[in-house]
């Protein structure tokens, strides 16, 4: 593959996030979208036509095509690991939605498949590509406000559609998978440490008839991150059964940093508050920045900034949170 050649993409799943974010991002970077994979031929054809994509095909046909270099996996969470591994074995690079998999065991299998195939996998945490996150990391690394002591991250909203895959345990539903993964990811990124759990409170749905376990629809966790400058406490809230609230802040020994729009940062002007000063960031598309970086890495021009080993550590922390949520639910 030459350095100037755009990647040829297949979209796995006629998903809302593909329509709203990734197809525009792929187009913005000049990529070619060759086909979309859909479980239903008529719906796939309609989705392809609506987005100017030439082919609507089945999932298996999509990953078998030899005119596709990379797959964007937009399936519900239960489909991330199995279909990413199939795509890797078919010689495709994979940009896979978050959370990368249902547990660390699945991520380890993806890591093995990536190494065996020589193809890349990247967890689509697009928020990490927004310049405000680079600036926040730079400020923390500089120690300008002293060591971090507390981190607080919230991501909640009301999801009234009970048919959504997020409410379905069989599809990898739950607020920790859907939303809690963001503040957890940012806490790990800022502390460069892995958490231990101090406390967890979670509201679970009732198990489906004949099934096992419900999903966590609201959860609060307190974690401890051990850093060279001492322990950091991370307070994390996530829910899709509460009104919208999304915020991230750091209390350092000598000041406070906060991001009013930490995660859903596409297409809005964002701000970083540093004590009583404010830095403003121009509107940008972090999905397009992520796609551009992934394409460069797939062409061998650079290494991925965020590795599968990092996704494995993220999944191990998620396993810890999920296990605690299900072990001690709030009635
Ligand atoms: N990075 C972000 O900003 C962001 C934002 C939202 C969502 N996400 C992630 O993106 C993924 C998809 O989320 P979404 O909200 O776009 O979901 P969605 O609209 O429900 O789409 C999921 C797609 O998965 C396919 N699918 C396969 N098996 C399915 C099943 N048993 N039930 C339902 N759908 C099934 C369907 O495609 P076909 O019918 O075409 O086969 C469906 O269109 C999730 O992993 C989510 O965490 C990421």
Image (cartoon, rainbow, N blue to C red):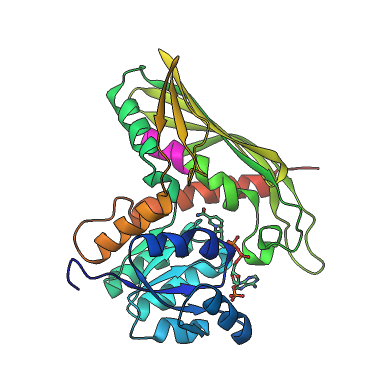
- Which residue is at 59% across, 86% downward? 41
Q: In the image, residue 55 lies at what x, y percent?
A: 47, 84
Q: What range of the chain is rendered magenta? A: 185-193
Expressed as whole percent of the image width and height from the top left, the position of residue 330 reads: 76, 41
Instruction: Say if residue 257 shows up in the picture.
Output: yes
On the picture, is 160 further left or further right than 222? right
Residue 327 appears in the figure: no
Q: Is residue 264 above or below residue 76?
A: above
* Location of the C terminus (image quadrant): top right
Residue shown at 80% from the left, 69% from the top = 210
Total tally of numbered discs in the picture: 0
Looking at the picture, tell me which residue is in the foreground, 124 or 50. 50
- The majority secondary structure of the magenta stretch comes to helix
Rendered view: 84 above or below 303: below
> Is-magenta flag for residue 7?
no
Residue 285 vertical position relative to residue 50 in the rendered view, above or below: above
Residue drawn at point x = 20 percent, y = 64 percent: 300
Q: Nearer the viewer, residue 69 or 105?
A: 69
Does 183 sit left or right of 126 as displayed?
right
Q: Give the camera-side residue of 51 and 152.
A: 51
Residue closer to the observer: 170 or 292: 292
Which residue occupies 20% across, 73% down? 1
List x then y, in percent, for residue 222.
57, 32
x then y, percent, for residue 314: 45, 49
Taking the image as four quarters, which one is ligand 1 found in? bottom right
Residue 192 painted magenta: yes
């Amino acid at each position: 593959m030459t350095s100037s050649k755009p990647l040829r993409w297949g979209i796995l799943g006629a998903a809302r996030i593909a329509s709203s974010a990734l197809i525009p991002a792929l187009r913005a970077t000049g990529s070619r979208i060759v086909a979309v994979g859909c479980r239903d031929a008529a719906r796939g054809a309609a989705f392809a036509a609506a987005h100017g994509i030439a082919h609507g095909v089945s999932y298996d046909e999509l990953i078998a095509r030899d005119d596709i270099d990379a797959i964007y996996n937009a399936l519900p969470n239960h489909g991330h690991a199995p279909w990413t591994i199939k795509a890797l074995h078919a010689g495709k690079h994979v940009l896979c939605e978050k959370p990368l998999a249902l547990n660390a065991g699945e991520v380890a299998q993806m890591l093995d498949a990536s190494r065996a195939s020589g193809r890349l996998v990247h967890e689509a945490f697009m928020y990490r590509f927004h310049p405000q996150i680079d600036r926040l990391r730079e400020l923390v690394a500089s120690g300008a406000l002293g060591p971090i002591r507390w981190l607080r991250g919230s991501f909640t909203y009301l999801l009234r559609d009970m048919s959504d895959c997020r409410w379905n345990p069989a599809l990898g539903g739950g607020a920790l998978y859907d939303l809690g993964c963001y503040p957890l990811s940012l806490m790990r990124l800022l502390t460069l440490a892995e958490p231990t759990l101090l406390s967890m409170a979670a509201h679970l749905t009732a198990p489906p008839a004949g099934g096992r376990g419900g999903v966590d629809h609201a959860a609060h966790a307190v974690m401890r991150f051990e850093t060279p400058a001492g322990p950091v406490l991370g307070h994390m809230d996530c829910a899709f059964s509460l009104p919208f609230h999304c915020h991230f802040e750091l209390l350092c020994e000598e000041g406070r940093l906060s991001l009013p729009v930490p995660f859903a940062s596409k297409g809005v002007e964002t701000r970083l508050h540093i004590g009583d000063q404010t830095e403003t960031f121009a509107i940008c598309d972090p999905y397009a920045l992520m796609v551009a970086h992934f394409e460069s890495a797939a062409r061998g021009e650079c290494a991925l900034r965020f590795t599968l080993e990092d996704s494995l550590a993220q999944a191990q922390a998620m396993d810890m949170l999920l296990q605690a949520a299900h072990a001690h639910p709030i009635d």
